[in-house]
Image (spheres, helix red, strand yellow):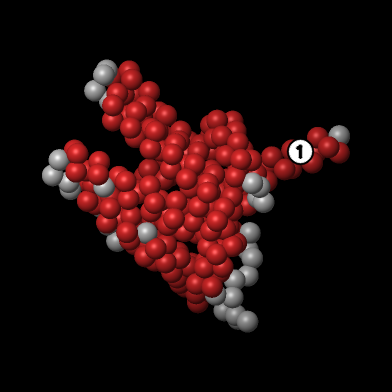
Amino acid sequence: MRDFSGLTETLYTATEWIMRFSVINVLWFILNIPIVFTITSIFFGNSESSSLLYLWPLVVLLPALFFPSTAAMFSTVREWIIKKDQASLTKTYFSHLKATYKKSFLSGIVLMALWFIWILDFTFFKNENDLIWTMFVVVGLILFVFTINFFSLSAHYQMNNKALLKNAFFVTVGNPLLSLFILISNLSLFYVSATELLFLWPLFAGTVSAFLSFLAFYRFSLKVEEKALKNKEG
């Protein structure tokens, strides 16, 4: 049991949170190294055809690695926010990964298909005119927020994938302020990580993104549940 106060308590809490963010992010990053390598190969490909060739491994890697590992990260972060005790960060993360792997794999196939359709359409139509380009950018941003909300919903509620997809859509389009916060916070974080502070990717970027996104979603869900309870009592 801790018995700290003042500056000591502040330093202990800060150290504890830094460890939480870094440990889970490192685990998540290690699991996704094959995807990082594949995406790097796409960006540094010598030709468009060779770059497109590298897209095919992602068909397997994204649902097999990225979506389950990210879903487990959101579930772990959720427990921090609702203040649920965790005996071990590593054990907690891998227990969530094991418990939700099949469900995350199947939902990952659906989400990956949506993203691939968008990528192919965007690649094909991007040179048509500015209006079409802008439209596909907007659709891509909405799809990004939709994906984040899907992870938050899957971490917080026990629903099947069909219900999760449907509710993620309603949350995304039905609450513009939540969607705008998720979009701005995540894009700002990813921009800083990609251009200024590269060390954030393996150490903090994923968990900070999950923390901010789920925290915003959690506050939104509490308001919805409170409003539904008042309507029921009224």
Q: Residue at x 79, y 41 (%)?
A: 229
Q: Quadrant of residue 161?
A: top right
Q: What amino acid type is highlighted by mark number 1?
A: Ala
Q: Residue at x 49, y 41 (%)?
A: 110
Residue 113 locus on image (x, y percent): 43, 39
Locate the C terminus by quadrant: top right
Residue 196 locus on image (x, y percent): 25, 52
Q: Quadrant of residue 37?
A: bottom left
Q: Residue at x 53, y 62 (%)?
A: 97
Q: Crowdedness of circle 1 by 10 Å Cα count: few (<14), some, many (20+)?
A: few
Q: Is residue 74 visible?
A: no
List the residue tagged with mark 1: 228
- Image-based side of 71 in relation to 82, left or right: left
Q: Helix, strand or loop at disc 1?
A: helix
Q: Is residue 21 visible?
A: yes
Q: Is residue 119 above or below residue 51?
A: above
Q: Is residue 207 above or below residue 195?
A: below
Comparing 59 with 35, the one in front is 59
